[in-house]
Image (cartoon, rainbow, N blue to C red):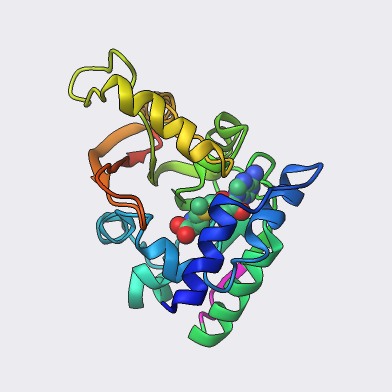
Amino acid sequence: MGALSQLRTLYHLTLSPIRGETHQQRLDSFYGGQAEDYDEFRKRMLHGREALFDALPAPAGGAWVDIGAGTARNGELFGERLREFGSVTFLDLSRSLLKVADERIAREQWANARTLCADATEIDLPDGSADLVTFTYSLTMIPDWFAAIEQAHRLLRPGGVIGVVDFYVSRRYPADGLRRHSYFARNFWPFWFGNDNVHPSADHLPMLQRRFQTLQVDEHYGKLPWVPVVRAPYYRFIGRKPAA
Ligand SMILES: C[S@@+](CC[C@H](N)C(=O)[O-])C[C@H]1O[C@@H](n2cnc3c(N)ncnc32)[C@H](O)[C@@H]1O
């Protein structure tokens, strides 16, 4: 990635003010100036997406909805398996990122894929119409994230799979088997990311575990570009909607 592109992206991440009356306007104010450089910069920042897609099923003829899909880069992470789905929907509220997604769909000739400009909290797709729903680093950007999780639950057919990877912080007293982050980490990361309207939470993972049967959870730390020493915590969750 060129130095100029990196500086432009850094400017939007750190200095450029986010403006707008609505959530959608704020998203486009944030992403409008960095949409073209988005993928290259985020590769070094949004860890764990490759491992998530390696572990997710791609049922032949099934329906996959990627919520907060941005530029549709996740499509590439499925590789040739993407073509096995009956339908793929890259849903996002940012028109500037969806423009890049449309270009990618055309370039890759994904005949089964489309973009959908919609709010993750009010998705106009039928109940039980998805076999797989994913959120990669999008729950932390959705203010009503609990409504987005409810939408994912509604969209999935019984037995359908949900895959999530995102930044988070632990609870002070996490459930058995989950990590406990330091006082510093639990306070620093929400403050740091909050500037970009990204909100790592202690509640996303417990809510996912409440709504879905856990198939896999793992917790990690990842390096951020231009940030020395500290590592940002992220988790991966794979769950199943229980059969009715
Ligand atoms: C950090 S980006 C991640 C994009 C992509 N999933 C990836 O892994 O590269 C977060 C995405 O969530 C989208 N988003 C935020 N709020 C949303 C909402 N209410 N409905 C739909 N998408 C939303 C943003 O527009 C952005 O594309």
**Residue at x 46% of width, y 31% of height:** 190
**Residue at x 39% of width, y 41% of height:** 167
Q: Image quadrant for the N terminus?
A: bottom left
Q: Image quadrant for the C terminus?
A: top left
Instruction: Say which of 15 and 176 sits in front.
Output: 15
- Left or right side of 205 for 221: left
Predominant secondary structure, magenta span? loop
**Residue at x 38% of width, y 67% of height:** 60
- Residue 31: image location, x then y, percent: 63, 59
- Residue 172: image location, x then y, percent: 31, 15
Can residue 88 be seen here? The reply is no
- Left or right side of 145 for 126: right
**Residue at x 48% of width, y 31% of height:** 191
Extreme residue in the right direction: 21
Compared to residue 238, the image places residue 96 above or below, namely below
Q: Is residue 172 shown in magenta?
A: no
Instruction: Say which of 11 and 68 sits in front.
Output: 11
The picture quadrant where one finds residue 186 is top left
Compared to residue 6, the image places residue 30 above or below, namely above
Q: Is residue 113 shown in magenta?
A: yes
Extreme residue in the top direction: 173
- Residue 13: image location, x then y, percent: 54, 53
Can residue 128 be seen here? The reply is yes
- Residue 153: image location, x then y, percent: 51, 37
Extreme residue in the left direction: 177
Instruction: Say which of 146 and 223 sits in front.
Output: 223
Segment colored magenta: 110-114
Count of labels in the image: 0
